[in-house]
Amino acid sequence: MAFLELHEVVKSFGRNTVVRGLSLNVDKGEFVSLLGGSGCGKTTTLRMIAGFETPTDGSILVGGKDVSRVPPNRRNLGMVFQNYALFPNMSVRRNIGFGLRIAGKHGAEVERRVDEMLELIHMEEFAQRYPHQLSGGQQQRVALARAIAIQPQALLLDEPLSALDAKIRVRLRDDIRAIQQKLGITTIYVTHDQEEALSISDRVAVMREGLIEQIGAPFEIYNRPATPYVAAFIGTQNLLGATVIDPAAGIVSVEGQSLEAGHPLDAKVGEELRLRVRPEALSLGRSGPNRLGGRVASQKLLGSIVRLVVRVGDTEVFMDGFNDPLLKLPAVGEAVTLSFSPEACTFAEPGAEPIAAAALEDEEETP
Ligand SMILES: Nc1ncnc2c1ncn2[C@@H]1O[C@H](COP(=O)(O)OP(=O)(O)O)[C@@H](O)[C@H]1O
Ligand SMILES: [Mg+2]
């Protein structure tokens, strides 16, 4: 039996149904992320788990007990939000001890627990400071310490890093994961940032329009997307128009060049499909069994990655390689061959529209 269970949970606001029969099982000690674009129902789902919203239908169980109608303060859950939400008039020490005092603890017991928390977040020397005297990252550390000081049954985090700088974000997410693993605390982490979700979770639940589209280990989500939506949402995909030549042998034609799918295709001769292949699965040269000839349109330095844009017929194809000071890239206009393995290919129906990955990255959450 899972520790936290959502059974076909529905949430409607008036006539607007925003969570549409969502089911989820989370094991004790597991770290699960809810990942999805703005407005897909992540926060609403988390707020129902916390008890701030009541499901319109369905049920939520913690440790086998139905808590759907238990008020938040009786669920023993720790929460961290995007906006720091510390008490501005309380010192760090008093903020962290707040939940303990509410729970009726006092004196030495509270102080001892707060000291433990300060050590855990490496902020011993900041105990007497007030929130306005802390950086955003430090404030989120304190918020995390306050949430786990009460030894909650589970930790719920809603975009806790969204307001922080990129560098701090990466450090703090690793710290959150390390603390979570050290304490073995069951954690639900809401984010719209796929890199964040993939890097720290045991499992990632990709949400879309109030439902989980796919749930799995990060590696599985990235390498074996179960639906066209997940394939388009996670990472970058090249999409190429492919005509089926020999379905049994898995042969297609892309821009007049014959390619192997590596498996039989459930399609008819002459049928139009979309071939998906990730930029990092391509390499320059004739090493792989699948080859596409084209001309270099541009190069982009993305930091550790160099992206080559190659025009293959009417399609622009991205190829990603690691940056290296000795790297010699072909010049713009030069003819090149791109190679990839049949295993790197997946196929979609032509009607399955991709969503613009760039547009999703730009999306900002409003707190
Ligand atoms: N209290 C509310 N009343 C009415 N609509 C709401 C309320 N809370 C959220 N919504 C709507 O529910 C949808 C999902 O919101 P939310 O769960 O916050 O999405 P996410 O966190 O994934 O961005 C949005 O369309 C939002 O406007
Ligand atoms: Mg939200």
Image (spheres, grey):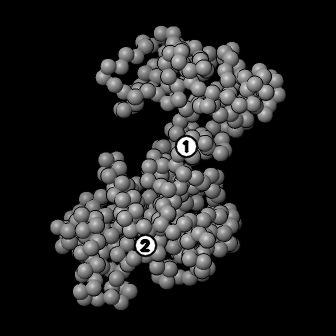
Residue 80 in view, yes or no: no
For the residue labelled by badge 1, is the local secondary structure a helix, a strand or a loop? helix
CA separation, marks 2 and 1?
Answer: 30 Å
For label 2, being within 8 Å of ligand 2 is answered no
Number of marks present in the image shown = 2
Rendered residue at 66%/41% (across/down): 228
Rendered residue at 70%/38% (across/down): 352
Kind of residue at disc 1: Tyr
Given residues 37 and 151, the one toward you in this image is 151
Rendered residue at 68%/62% (across/down): 20
Q: What quarter of the picture does the C terminus occupy?
A: bottom left
For the residue labelled by badge 2, is the local secondary structure a helix, a strand or a loop? strand
- In the rendered image, the vertical position of residue 125 relative to residue 241, given as above or below: below
For label 1, being within 8 Å of ligand 1 is answered no
Rendered residue at 17%/67% (across/down): 125
Kind of residue at disc 2: Gly
Given residues 193 and 361, the one toward you in this image is 193
**Residue 341 pos. (x, y %):** 59, 26
Given residues 222 and 162, the one toward you in this image is 222
The residue singled out by tag 1 in the image is 222
- In the rendered image, the vertical position of residue 131 relative to residue 294, given as above or below: below
Mark 1 crowd level (few <14, some 14–19, many ≥20, 10 Å Cα): some
Q: Is residue 361 left or right of 221 when viewed as pictured?
A: left
Q: Is residue 37 left or right of 240 when viewed as pictured?
A: left
The residue singled out by tag 2 in the image is 78
